[in-house]
Image (cartoon, rainbow, N blue to C red):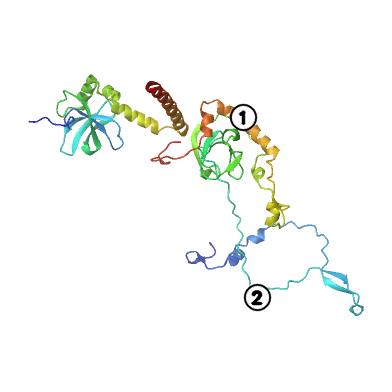
Amino acid sequence: MPESNFKRFVEVGRVVLVNDGPLAGKIAVIAEIIDHNRAIIDGPTSGIPRQSFPYKHLLLTPLKLTKLPRAAGTGIVRKLVEQEGIVEKWDKSAWAQKRVMKEKRRSLSDFGRFKVMLAKKQRRDVVRKAVKKASA
Amino acid sequence: MARSKELVPGVGRLSRSQVFTKRGLYKGIKKSDKPAGEEPAATKEKAVGGAKNGEKRVIPTVKAPRYYPTEDVRQPKKSRKSHNPPGLRSSITPGTVLILLAGRFRGKRVVFLKQLESGLLLVTGPYKANGVPLRRVNQAYVIATSTKLELPGFTVDEKINDAYFAKTSTKGARSAEEEFFEDGKPKAKETFPATKAADQKQVDSAILDAVKKTPDLVKYLKSTWGLSKGQYPHQLMF
């Protein structure tokens, strides 16, 4: 069989990011696949109760629990997630950090946005001067 | 319309005056009689020229009207309702930085001082920072930001009220020529009254002191606000 180009699969143990609904922005683990539309997800450490969820509203992350048995209960999921440090790994990932940054920018006040503009100007100035110096 | 049974919704059986009579509220009205002063004389004598005219004539002091309407003209009902000035938005407190959205200074960021009796907001640039003088604005044309200045113990002088900003009215008819020209030349511009300039300075000195306590805030007040591509005011936080 030729190598697949796909890296992330819908599989038991896959860490997913909920992308819709009141729980949007939290991560969970696929505990069991129901059919080609839905899976049972569980996120005891991130505040997602065990429930069925459509794939449409999930995003697959590169993270995965290695040894999660099929249809494991919340207790086992919690234990494995804590063991493998999934939440810390997710928080450290560029994806999660970018999301945090975006949220921060979005919640800035008018004065905050102005200060960002000033900081960017300053940075631009430093970079330009450095480039000029290096290319001269 | 308790006494006046409805014929159809909104139309009573009795007229307004009939209801008034039935209710009999007029009976209870207490009137205080004014001390009867001397009635002005109904007639006066006037000297008349001409030998055959009897020298003088008695004429009424008030002329009878020369015109009577042929039909009764209905008097519109006087309304005793009056508008109350609008309340202040909860996000606006003294020291709040506001963004003006309309008028000559649209886009400017200004400092809110207080709400005047008419409901309009008293704001200042401060003038030295961004050129906006002491000014009244409608709060409907303003965005309140979450940026607030600390103004402990600051009060606006009582004399700065709605009348302070009113235009001086010139009575009587004046031609446009008179208004704009003098000796065939355009009139010289009136200078800004020194007292108002002093008031501006006095208010702004306190405000500017507070502004300078926060870094970059002077720059912020100097800059103007606007929307760039992909920015929607309802999605922004202020």
**Left or right of B202, for residue A12:** left
**Left or right of A27, for residue B157:** right
Q: Position of residue B72 (x, y in %)?
A: 63, 72
- Residue drawn at (73%, 73%) of the image: B66
Q: Secondary structure at mark 2?
A: loop
Which of A59/B79 is in front?
A: A59
Q: CA distance from mark 2 to mark 1?
A: 67 Å
Q: Earlier in the sequence, mark 2 or mark 1?
A: 2
Quadrant of the image occupied by residue A84: top left
Q: Residue furthest right?
A: B51
Q: In this rendering, is residue B122 above or below B182? A: above
Q: Residues within 10 Å of mark 1 (few under 14, many from 20)?
A: some
Quadrant of the image occupied by residue A6: top left
Residue B206 bears which disc, if any? 1
Q: Residues within 10 Å of mark 2 (few under 14, many from 20)?
A: few
| Image quadrant containing the N terminus of chain A | top left
Quadrant of the image occupied by residue B56: bottom right
Residue B70 bears which disc, if any? 2
